[in-house]
Image (cartoon, rainbow, N blue to C red):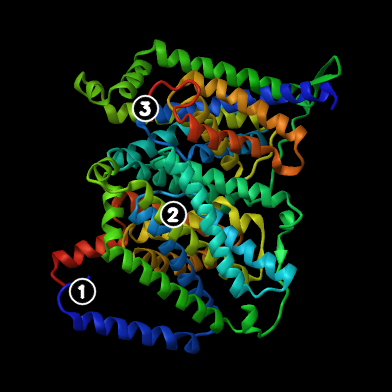
Amino acid sequence: MDTNILVQAVISGLLMGGIYALVAVSLNLIFGVMKIINFAHGAFMMLGMYFTYWVSIFLDIHPYLSLFISMSALFVIGFFIQYGLINRIIEAPEHNQLLLTLGIALFFENLALFLWSPNYRMLQVTTLAGAMHTHKLMFSTPRMIAFGAALTMTLLLYLFLTKTDSGKAIRAISQDREGAHVIGINMKIIYSVAFGIGSACVAAAGTMITPFFYISPTVGLVFVITAFVIVVLGGLGSFWGAFFGALIVGIAESLGEVLLPGSLKQVPIYSIFILTLLLRPKGLFGKKHV
Amino acid sequence: MFRNGTPKILFFWFAFILIAVLLPFLLPSYFVHILIMILFYGFLGTSWNILGGYAGQFSFGHAAFFGIGAYTSTLIFVNWGISPWIGMVFGGLLGMLLGLLMGSLCFHYGLKGPYFALATLAFAELLRLISLNLDLTGKAMGILIPLKGNALLSFQHESKIFYYFVILLMFIGVLWVAQWIDRGKIGDYFAAIREDEDSAEAIGVNTFAYKLLGILISSFLTALGGTFYAQYFLYIDPRVTFGVGTSIEIFLRPIVGGMGTVYGPIIGALVLGPLGEVTRGILGGYHGVHLMIYGAILVGVIVFLPKGIYGWLDGFTRRHKW
């Protein structure tokens, strides 16, 4: 095997890993605060992609400019789903919450199927078609931009969580629910804000990959399962665990694509997933036992 | 339901069996198909319910067992001409073997709740990817089962009524198993594990053994359902057998109907089946659009009827001394 191909695979994997990082970190935000494994996360990403697609087609603007539209739309959707639905069952057994978010995912995925057909769509962005070439290696422009934007968003989210009052309230709840309640944090609102922010972040990931990734009603499923793998690998609730887990999974997937035939590229990922669940359920960076 | 007096129960059963036997001869073939699908998902839901509902081990990957059943009987029929009836038994046993593997791994390492759910999902996805890449399983093209006409020994018939009675018997069988678990000691142990596993362990329940028993029964039965699916549609591919959608379809009905109850899964199937058909009729178009309505129902049930339709009905009849 040509080493060039392997290096190229690592680079592509790393670039995709940046996107996965944003998806996984925002999934982890929701898990950390509400202890909910949010199955609808992928559906929100899919909605973000479709918003970007339609906005850039109808308003004839660059897809990146739709970022604020898709983020605000998904913030509002996420906020009200948490406020109106998930808050009602926050004390119910864990699998009920999983099922509720699964129901939401099924609803949105098939709503998209109904409205926009199962056809794969691609957004052709001529200004972004280029790539950088050095030492026989290729760096695709839209992927580099998406990588940079995803890292920036992840960093902003980190700063939000550590530096702002709302962010601190979110972290306070994730560390001690009762204590946070006692000192007067409005749980319902903070939950809803956290869910809205998580949804807006995954919508941003959706917008950033639209210039180079196909759009279909079920595209979110691929990402949400990968994000589950990542957060379990990195440790549920661990911010940096999700971040580095995403880069590892991105590279593993990309190497799998080069080294394994056909659609077996995801086999290493699921194997890592099962092994982590069995042997180290708290993940690579997780602190507490499950 | 029907708490006071046996005659009501006897009458209920007599009427049920009479209607069940006569119905397919009175209805047009399309409605027989709907009935078959109701019983089929009632069968799968009840099988899932033994592990997921009674023992509280929420499997998100029952498609793994379903697919093993479908591929086993189909492959030995297509390659060696062995009757799918025999293949069904082998499929069930192989499904059980997979259940043994998954169960002993997951339960040995103490995977619970969402972690167990995600692990089972990963197993099913692995099998889907493998069947998508093996020549043996026909890759993404899947396998067409050769038509044999009215060959009962080959588990084939041109009339839907044949399949109706097969799935009716399978459903009654699985209902009997569920009833047996529900009323027996196993059901009590399962309930103890579901409600509080640590306490169950503390009072001397061998939780590992009982959870394993749950997955063995459940996986065997689910694999039988896989063979029925293959013979009824005479076509299988990796997505319809091992796909996430199949796992969801399997557990949707027991959850909507009522987890951990004997009649919950079939009540769920009775509600979702016709509703799915009606939605398909109204929305038309693409395969799977009915899942939009199922998703909305799932949300409604989880928020408003956490014990499912059966739990709600049960509470209703108790309150009104029916």
Which is in the foreground here, disc 3 or disc 2? 2
What element does badge 2 sit on?
Answer: helix
The reply to whether residue B43 is visible in this rendering is yes
Please report the residue visible at 46 percent of the width from the left and 28 percent of the height from the top.
A28
Query: Three-letter amino acid code at disc 2?
Result: Ile
Q: Which residue position is annotated with label 3?
A: A33
Residue B42 location, quadrant: bottom left
The x, y position of residue A238, in whole percent, is: 45, 22
Left or right relative to B17: residue B273: right
Instruction: Kindly indicate whether the residues beneath marks 3 and 2 are on one polypeptide chain.
Output: no
Q: Which residue position is annotated with label 2?
A: B215
What element does badge 1 sit on?
Answer: loop
- The chain under label 1 reads B
Please report the residue visible at 34 percent of the width from the left and 14 percent of the height from the top.
A165
Q: Which residue position is annotated with label 1?
A: B2
Please report the residue visible at 28 percent of the width from the left and 43 percent of the height from the top.
B201
The reply to whether residue A65 is visible in this rendering is no
